[in-house]
Image (cartoon, rainbow, N blue to C red):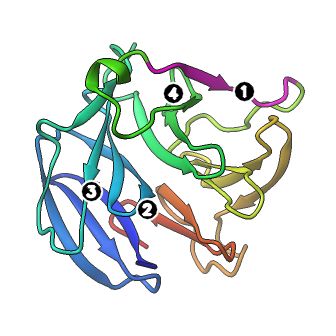
Amino acid sequence: TQTLFAVINRPPAVAELSTDGQLLRLMPVDGADDPEGIAHIDGHLFAIADERRNRIHWVEIGPEHQRVSLRDTQALWLGKPRIRNFALEGLGWDAQRQQLLAVTEKWPLQVLAMDAVPGQKKAALAEVAIQRWASAPASGVPTTDLASIDVDPRTGNLLLLGEESSVLYEYTRAGEPVGMLPLWAGMQGLEKTIPQPEGVAVDPAGRVFVVSEPNLF
């Protein structure tokens, strides 16, 4: 659709935006406690992360939808988090590898990759192999938290968003650092520092879109 989809957690909703930031639809989400991440997979299929429940849900969002329900959807539970409200924080889809990527905010701060194919039975989803992605030991990821993740479709590189640092980091899938994009005043044409960047998306042309609390695009 050449549009952007974002989640809002209070109250739970999915927003559809044009690439210049116009709000096209605001769809309440039923059956969600704390939606924090969304990824488009294919067609009308999306994945939504509910942080408080530490679950990933697969849902259909077509052009006719005015509400979204997570009830009775296929879902993958990632276990009980060590600290409540520091679990699933962002999702991204790697179309080339057909992998769903997820970041957990902190404690532990990590990137997860899973071959969770939509259409699998719930029992099969529960057995999905989840792998931890790691940066090269010499570099690490110089951030205290991870808020969002996406994949650059041109290179397959990972884009990792740090909310507390207000920096976007780029890594190869092998874990080597490629670059970083500070989202600070006076850099990248920004008049003000992006206050609380929480979501990132990149389009096939390499344009980067960032959403920030409180409801900034």
* Residue occupied by mark 4: 106
State the image quarter where residue 171 is shown: top right
Q: If you read the primary sequence from the N terminus, does the residue marked by circle 3 or circle 2 appear first?
A: 3
Kindly report the distance in space between the C-alpha atoms of the residues bearing marks 2 and 4: 18 Å
Q: Is residue 65 left or right of residue 205?
A: left
Does dot 4 land on a helix, a strand or a loop?
loop
Q: Which residues are magenta?
A: 128-137
Q: Image quadrant for the C terminus?
A: bottom left
Does dot 2 land on a helix, a strand or a loop?
strand
Residue 8 percent coordinates (x, y): 26, 56
* Residue occupied by mark 3: 8
* Residue occupied by mark 2: 212
Q: Amino acid at mark 4?
A: Lys
Mark carried by residue 134: 1
Is there CB contact under 8 Å for labels 2 and 4?
Answer: no
Foreground mark, 1 or 2, reads 1
Kindly report the distance in space between the C-alpha atoms of the residues bearing marks 4 and 3: 20 Å
Residue displayed at 38% across by 63% down:
43
Q: Amino acid at mark 2?
A: Ser
State the image quarter where residue 53 is shown: top left
Foreground mark, 3 or 1, reads 1
How dense is the environment of label 2, judged by Cα within 10 Å: few (below 14), some, or many (20 and up)?
A: some
Magenta-drawn stretch contains 100 = no
Residue 82 percent coordinates (x, y): 40, 13
124 w.r.t. 158: above or below: above
Residue displayed at 38% across by 21% down:
78
Does dot 1 land on a helix, a strand or a loop?
loop
Does dot 3 land on a helix, a strand or a loop?
strand
Q: Amino acid at mark 3?
A: Ile
Kindly report the distance in space between the C-alpha atoms of the residues bearing marks 1 and 2: 26 Å
